[in-house]
Image (cartoon, helix red, strand yellow):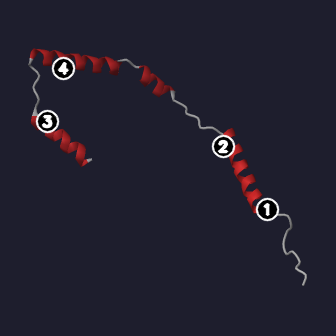
Amino acid sequence: MKINNIGSMGVNPYKRNQEKSDLANQKSQVQKDKVEISTEAIDLQQSNEVAKAREEKVQAIKAQLENGTYRIDPKEIAKGLLNFYKK
């Protein structure tokens, strides 16, 4: 009994899969992610106004803690928590 090959001869599916993965690796190596920061974002990062205001607030709270005049309003804390968890 003679069996004739049907279809293409010499096709190795494993080799074909390897070639596809090699091609995908080559593409991923060529294309890299890139991040661009806008000029407005750079200006915001370099802006010291927010940092100065935050530093002043921290210093004021530190002074109040040292003097013993810092008071916590439990109602404001509760309102803040409720607003945070409602969102």
Residue at label 3?
76
In the picture shown, does residue 65 fall above or below 25?
above
- Mark 3 crowdedness (10 Å alpha carbons): few <14, some 14-19, many ≥20: few
Q: Foreground: 67 or 12?
A: 12
Q: Earlier in the sequence, mark 2 or mark 4?
A: 2
Image point 16% across, 15% down: which residue?
Answer: 63
Q: Distance from label 2 to label 4 (Cα)?
A: 51 Å
Q: Foreground: 3 or 46?
A: 3
Q: Earlier in the sequence, mark 4 or mark 1?
A: 1
* Amino acid type shown at disc 4: Ile
Q: Nearer the viewer, mark 2 or mark 4?
A: 2
SS category of the residue bearing label 1: loop
SS category of the residue bearing label 2: helix
Instruction: Check if mark 2's residue and mark 3's residue have beta carbons within 8 Å.
Output: no
Q: Nearer the viewer, mark 3 or mark 4?
A: 4
* Left or right of residue 61: residue 1: right
Work out which quarter of the rendered image holds the N terminus and state it.
Answer: bottom right
Q: Distance from label 2 to label 3 (Cα)?
A: 52 Å
Instruction: Check if mark 2's residue and mark 4's residue have beta carbons within 8 Å.
Output: no
* Amino acid type shown at disc 3: Glu
Image point 19% across, 17% down: which residue?
Answer: 62
Instruction: Check if mark 4's residue and mark 1's residue have beta carbons within 8 Å.
Output: no
